Amino acid sequence: MSSTRTRSEYGSLRPVVETIGAMIAVSVGYWFIGSFARPLAAFLFVLSPPASVHPWTLATSVYAHAGLGHLLSNALVVVVAGVPVAASTTRTRFHAFVLVTGALSGLAQIWVSGLLSPAGVLGISGAAFALVGYVAAANPAADALGRFAGRLGVPPRVVVLAVGALAVGVTLVLSPAGSALVAHLVGLLLGIVAGRMGLLRV
């Protein structure tokens, strides 16, 4: 019985370990190519407008990171928030969630930055914030809060506004200077919506 539980626990960690492995491998590739051909590295890994010109960067930009500190900080969030999510879903759903939320967050970032001054984006932080949002929204405490709001007769739109304001506050508090704030916020909101819907629940 003990060995079965151990295998089950290891299995739940597998997609998190694979995600960290992908982050390391793709980031090292980006750093290596960038050491002698920065334009090629940007072409292969950086999501920048218009995304339709190099659509593969919707995936590569999620796992590539600008430097070691960037990689380690995002890896920490992925581990902390990813383990509980991975334990409650399948390997395929976990990876799809990370890739889709990461890509959508990146797209939102380059779209907003394109309105001001076009800039590229790198990193899994949008997806990491989505994992945080999912854990927070799928937590039993979130259900209790929803029931409490219902008993108070609070309109649904007020709850939505409150969640939005909370998401903005969390994004500002947890995002260091120079971060892709739009990607973080969109990722967090995507995670909250997915968590409330139980999108990854098996």
Image: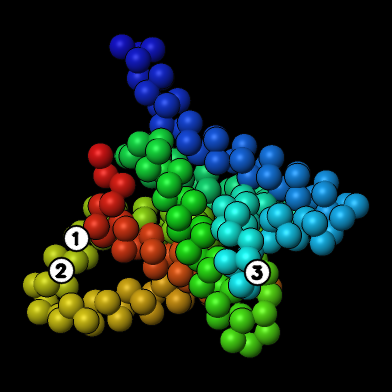
Task: Find out whether the residues at labels 1 and 2 contact each other: C-beta distance under 8 Å.
Answer: yes
Q: Amino acid at mark 2?
A: Phe
The residue closer to the viewer here, 28 or 107, is 107
**Which residue corresponds to the image point at 10% horizontal and 79% vertical from the top-left?**
153
Residue 129, x across and y down, in percent: 48, 60
Q: Quadrant of the N terminus?
A: top left
Left or right of 64: which side holds 196?
left
Q: Quadrant of residue 147?
A: bottom left
Q: Amino acid at mark 3?
A: Ser
Instruction: Report the colour scheme.
Output: rainbow
Instruction: Please tell me whether residue 168 is drawn above or below residue 54 in the rendered image.
Output: below
Q: Nearer the viewer, mark 1 or mark 3?
A: 3
Left or right of 42: which side holds 107?
left
Q: Quadrant of the C terminus?
A: top left
- Disc with the residue nearer the chain's start (3 vs 2): 3
- Classify mark 2: helix, strand or loop: helix
Disc 1 packing (10 Å; few <14; some 14–19; many ≥20): few
Instruction: Please tell me whether residue 164 is drawn above or below residue 92 in the rendered image.
Output: below
Q: State the residue position of label 2.
A: 148
Residue 164, x across and y down, in percent: 36, 77
- Disc with the residue nearer the chain's start (1 vs 3): 3
Disc 2 packing (10 Å; few <14; some 14–19; many ≥20): few
Q: State the residue position of label 3.
A: 48
Number of numbered discs overlaid on the protein picture: 3
**Which residue corresponds to the image point at 55% horizontal and 35% vertical from the top-left?**
18
> Distance from label 3 to label 2 (Cα)?
43 Å
Left or right of 194: which side holds 99?
right
Task: Find out whether the residues at labels 3 and 2 contact each other: C-beta distance under 8 Å.
Answer: no
Q: State the residue position of label 1.
A: 144
